[in-house]
């Protein structure tokens, strides 16, 4: 069982930066892939980024490539999403997700455990 708790969301002006964090519980963190998803107002949840168990494989949605960076610290059982040059369209609830496998894809069904989400609001 893995429990996930996101933090670090908030209100930021367009062009600003923000880092959201996800703290995980359980003994399997270093063996599982992690992902970030988001749900913007009135839209479906969408994939943002994913990272393999050791951090060697990272992948991003085209909409955030070059703008966001995913990372993890297995010793701290944490995964991060560093966001730069934020735009109003990045406004969303950001969710951390954990898979049961060392590598996972971009689909929601690739992930078993989910956090409650953290709100990121970008003002224009």
Image: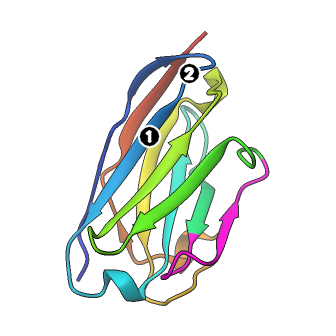
Q: Residue 61: x, y in percent?
A: 72, 55
Rendered view: 25 above or below 81: below
Rendered view: 70 above or below 44: below
The residues bearing labels 1 and 2 have C-alpha atoms spaced at a distance of 11 Å
Q: Nearer the viewer, residue 16 or 87?
A: 16
Q: Are marks 1 and 2 in contact (CB under 8 Å)?
A: no
Circle 2: is it few (<14), some (14-19), or many (20+) Cα within 10 Å?
some
Which stretch did the figure color magenta? 51-62
**Residue at figure coordinates x 64%, y 76% from the top left:** 57
Q: Residue 42: x, y in percent?
A: 57, 34
**Residue at figure coordinates x 44%, y 40% from the top left:** 19
Q: Residue 51: x, y in percent?
A: 56, 71
Q: Quadrant of residue 55?
A: bottom right
Rendered view: 93 above or below 89: below
- Identify the disc placed on residue 19: 1
Q: Residue 52: x, y in percent?
A: 55, 79
Q: Quadrant of residue 40?
A: top right
Magenta segment's dominant SS is loop
Check the picture and name the quadrant holding the C terminus. Answer: top right
Rendered view: 88 above or below 93: above
Q: Looking at the image, what colour scheme do you see?
A: rainbow
- Identify the disc placed on residue 43: none
**Residue at figure coordinates x 26%, y 77% from the top left:** 2
Left or right placement of residue 94 versus residue 42 in this view = left
Check the picture and name the quadrant holding the N terminus. Answer: bottom left
Tell me the element at label 1: strand
- Identify the disc placed on residue 16: 2
Residue furthest to the right: 62
Q: Nearer the viewer, residue 95 or 55?
A: 55
């Amino acid at each position: 069982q893995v429990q996930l708790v996101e933090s670090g969301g908030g209100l930021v002006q367009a062009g600003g930066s923000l880092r959201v964090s996800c703290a995980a519980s359980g003994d399997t963190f270093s063996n599982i892939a992690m992902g970030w998803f988001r749900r913007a107002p009135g839209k479906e949840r969408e994939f943002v980024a994913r990272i393999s168990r050791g951090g060697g494989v990272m992948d991003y949605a085209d909409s955030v490539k070059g703008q966001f960076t995913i990372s993890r610290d297995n010793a701290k059982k944490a995964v991060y999403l560093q966001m730069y040059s934020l735009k109003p369209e990045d406004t969303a609830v950001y969710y951390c997700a954990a898979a049961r496998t060392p590598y996972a894809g971009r689909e929601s069904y690739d992930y078993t455990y989910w956090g409650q989400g953290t709100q990121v609001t970008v003002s224009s």
